Amino acid sequence: MRRPVESAQYTSFRYATRLADLGVMASVGSVADSYDNAMAEALNGTFKAELIHRQTWRTRDQVEYAIVEWIGWYNHRRLHSAIGNVPPAEYEANYYRSANTPAPTGAR
C-alpha cells in the first residue's frame, strides 16, 4: 500500500491529451523539483492574498466577476518590478515589437 503523500509525479491523461490537441508542450520537471511550478504557485498565492481571502463571497457569480476584473487589472495595469515596472501585457507587446516577431494568436 502506498502512503498518501509519496514522491511520485504524474499528469492526467485527459490533461496531456488536451494539451496535445492544442499543440501545447507540457512543462513537467523531474521528480521532486518544483522549478516549473514555482511561477504558477507564486501567482496563485498573490491571487488568493489580494482577492480571494480579502472578503466573504456570497455567490459564485460575484467571485467569477471579481476574478475577471482582477486578471484584467493584473495583466494590463499592475506594475511588476521584476519586468521593469510595466504591466505584463505591455512587457509582452514590447518584447514582440523589439524581436520583430509576430505575437502569438491571442496576445495583444
Image (cartoon, grey):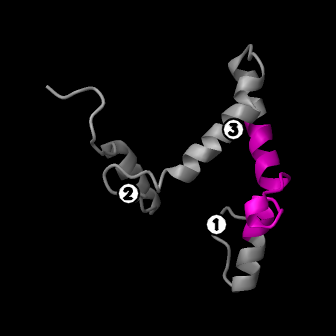
Q: Label 2 belongs to which residue? A: 29
> Residue 24 vs residue 60: left or right?
left
Q: Which amino acid does label 1 sit on?
A: Thr
Residue 26 placement (x, y as % from top left): 42, 58
Rendered residue at 35%/51% (across/down): 17
| Mark in front: 1 vs 3 | 3
Residue 9 placement (x, y as % from top left): 30, 45
- The image shows a total of numbered marks equal to 3
Residue 75 placement (x, y as % from top left): 76, 53
> Residue 65 or 57: which is nearer the viewer?
57
Q: Is residue 9 magenta?
A: no
Residue 105, numbered circle:
1
Rendered residue at 23%/27% (across/down): 3
Residue 47, numbered circle:
3
Q: Is residue 74 magenta?
A: yes
Which image quarter is the C terminus in? bottom right
- Point out the stretch of residues depicted in magenta: 67-92
Q: Residues within 10 Å of mark 2 (few under 14, many from 20)?
A: few
> Residue 78 or 102: which is nearer the viewer?
78
Q: Which of marks 2 and 1 is nearer the N terminus?
A: 2
